[in-house]
Image (cartoon, coloured by chain):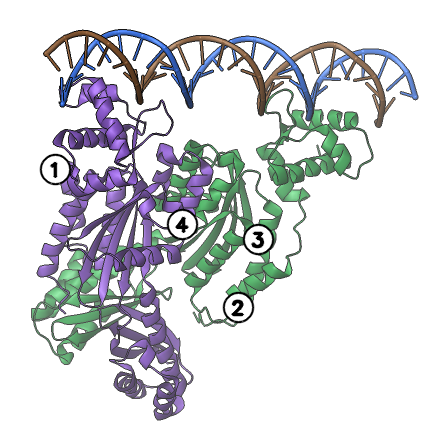
Chain colours: A purple, B green, C brown, D blue
DNA sequence: ATTAGCACTCGAGGAGTTAGAGTGCTAAAA
DNA sequence: TTTTAGCACTCTAACTCCTCGAGTGCTAAT
């Protein structure tokens, strides 16, 4: 059964009001603020029905009403209108997108920080790479006679390097022979496919530089593994405490610990995205829709980006359950549009 | 004038007690707990004098006493006894020092995280490089015909790389010519010494790859600048909220914002170290000794490490003003000892 | 110099009270 | 049938009042 138009308008008014003031809203304010010219009594009747339908809740009998998780869900799905960005917001996002900042991860992070400032919520950015990732190319070269640098480029375009101490003196020729061995043995293989016996075989080819080959293989393992896990950055942590629902330090600490735990956050995000493959990049998860305790009073807005075949980026904006979903969505939308455009004429030529 | 032995013992007992319980301590508990066999009345007299001397404070007339900043200062300078580490602590630190973890920054960060867990305080680590840092070596090589990777090794041993899109197709020979140009023009120069005219001259030598030279110069600028600023990692942020003095969300937020502001933290740390060149690696800054508002009720313990001529690392442990200075100092001490030993037979051959 | 005794102070915390916001219900009005 | 006004009712937040107890400072005795 779908709601009457009036019920919808009343529900929307209640949620807007509650998002703004964080206090249970009563029939009178709604009668006054909303454009419906009906009396508080009528609103009361409607509210009572909305409560029976599960969209509203009453903290106690003579307080106003508060939206339930289902109420917010309806709100983000159908009711809310995403506001136009202010000039200031648009400019800020544009400058974050500016061509100066070439690297995807950095850009995402910068945007997270920006959104945190614009919305006063905490944000996190998460970039993950598929476990089917492989090393595309190795390079090794000398810095001095005792030290080499190994550089790895992965299939998703990640670039990492490491300084490796040489087991013995070596010249350019020897080093480039090692690089050839590494390239022929270890490229185009996922982490699971680089077996110990393979490493041993490669090492034995390298003669007195076999240790170097082992180090390189180990490094490749690190890199592939590191990004299997994902990279997380948080911004605006202190803003959590500015919302009245986190006035209780225990509750605030619980959420904070959750958010600063990289493992938790990765698990949560991946869980959320695995069960949820609707089209469109912006998603919401609201209060008790979330299985994790620390998030039961929180809301999260996610934006996700698929960057080439092995790389995915997610940005999450975390606030109290009554967070301003509309505003956050508007910001994300704007950014995604610009971001996608940027990707098209991208340096990320996969 | 120096304090009588009894006064010192009483002061120490009060501070120990207060560190443990976070509540003003009265004469009775001290009479009971301390080994001095004197009556509460005597203690009261002594306490009253200690207050006049500025070592104690009274929140209100009939509460117990609380140590003042000066009281803590005396405590860390003369009174406290650093406890022996528990087996668990020592083991944890040893494993953080284990040779697995080769990179200094990573090791420092790991140790910060560890100390945070062991002590229940928030920690941060800061690594800075002197502005006299230069690029020691450039390397450039092709990944595919449109893309090159530039690698920079700095005088302090930092290693950075960046993918650069080529202005036009190029072969190995052209690229290594660019690398030669970069090496001859930009190495052994500080950021200030790489002038625009120098860049232009280098670019003009490179013919149709002049844009690539410009990109490389820009990248060098980024790297030298990035580390002029310093790198900060925080750990255990949520633990701030577990201390009763930060039960007030406003206060907690103030401190949190301060700590998550990279600029602030760097400025603070450098300020602290510039005016304070005593020997010995562990330092304290207590409450109002600190000029920054958000730290007026906090205490910080610093450990610092000079890693070669251009690189310095600092670790800071932040807690409430009544933090357990003795325990933190013990942990830091142990770590520093191990760390220095490690540095001696170091891979960091400068 | 130390201690016991005592009056005094002050804040934390509980009980009681009130004010006000908001509700649900009923009966009248549209 | 729907809407509205009116009203009694409920519940909390905030305030006052009060007591209890911890801790003090002072004085006089040891």
Q: Looking at the image, is B331 positioned above or below residue B268?
A: below
Count of picture labels: 4
* Residues behind callouts 4 and 2 on a single chain: no
The answer to whether residue B172 is visible is yes
x 31%, y 86%: residue: A178
Q: Is residue A142 above or below residue A37?
A: below
Disc on the earlier residue, 3 or 2: 3
Give x and y (percent) for residue B323.
Answer: 57, 42
Say which residue label 4 marks.
Answer: A258
Above or below: residue C21 compared with residue B240: above
- Observer-side mark, 4 or 2, equals 4
Q: Is mark 2 in CB contact (under 8 Å) with mark 1?
A: no
| Residue B292 appears in view | no
Q: Which residue, given by chain and number where applicable, does mark 2 sit on? A: B342
**Same-subunit check for callouts 3 and 1:** no
Would residue A63 be found to the left or right of residue B273 on screen?
Answer: left
Q: Quadrant of the N terminus of chain B?
A: top right
């Amino acid at each position: 059964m779908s709601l009457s138009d009036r019920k919808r308008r009343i529900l929307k008014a209640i949620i807007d009001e509650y998002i703004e003031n964080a206090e249970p809203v009563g029939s009178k304010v709604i009668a006054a603020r909303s454009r419906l010219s009906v009396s508080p009594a009528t609103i009361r009747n409607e509210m009572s029905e909305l409560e029976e339908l599960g969209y509203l809740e009453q903290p106690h009998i003579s307080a106003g009403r508060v939206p339930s998780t289902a109420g917010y869900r309806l709100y983000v799905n159908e009711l809310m209108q995403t506001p136009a960005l202010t000039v200031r917001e648009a400019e800020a996002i544009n400058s974050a997108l500016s061509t100066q900042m070439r690297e995807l991860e950095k850009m995402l992070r910068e945007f997270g920080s920006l959104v945190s400032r614009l919305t006063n919520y905490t944000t996190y950015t998460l970039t993950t790479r598929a476990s089917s990732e492989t090393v595309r190319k190795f390079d090794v070269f000398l810095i001095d006679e005792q030290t080499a640098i190994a550089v790895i480029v992965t299939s998703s375009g990640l670039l990492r390097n490491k300084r490796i101490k040489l087991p013995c003196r070596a010249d350019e020729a020897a080093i480039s022979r090692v690089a050839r061995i590494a390239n022929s043995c270890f490229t185009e293989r996922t982490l699971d496919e680089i077996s110990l016996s393979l490493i041993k075989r490669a090492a034995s080819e390298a003669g007195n530089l076999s240790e170097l080959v082992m180090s390189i293989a180990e490094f490749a393992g690190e890199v592939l593994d590191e990004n299997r896990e994902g990279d997380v950055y948080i911004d605006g942590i202190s803003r959590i405490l500015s919302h009245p629902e986190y006035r209780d330090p225990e509750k605030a600490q619980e959420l904070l610990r959750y958010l600063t735990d990289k493992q938790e956050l990765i698990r949560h995000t991946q869980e959320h995205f695995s069960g949820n493959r609707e089209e469109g990049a912006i998603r919401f998860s609201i209060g008790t829709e979330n299985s994790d305790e620390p998030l039961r009073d929180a809301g999260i807005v996610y934006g996700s980006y698929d960057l080439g075949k092995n790389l995915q980026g997610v940005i999450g904006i975390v606030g109290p359950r009554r967070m301003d979903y509309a505003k956050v969505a508007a910001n994300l939308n704007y950014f995604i549009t610009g971001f996608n455009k940027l990707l098209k004429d991208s340096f990320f030529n996969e």
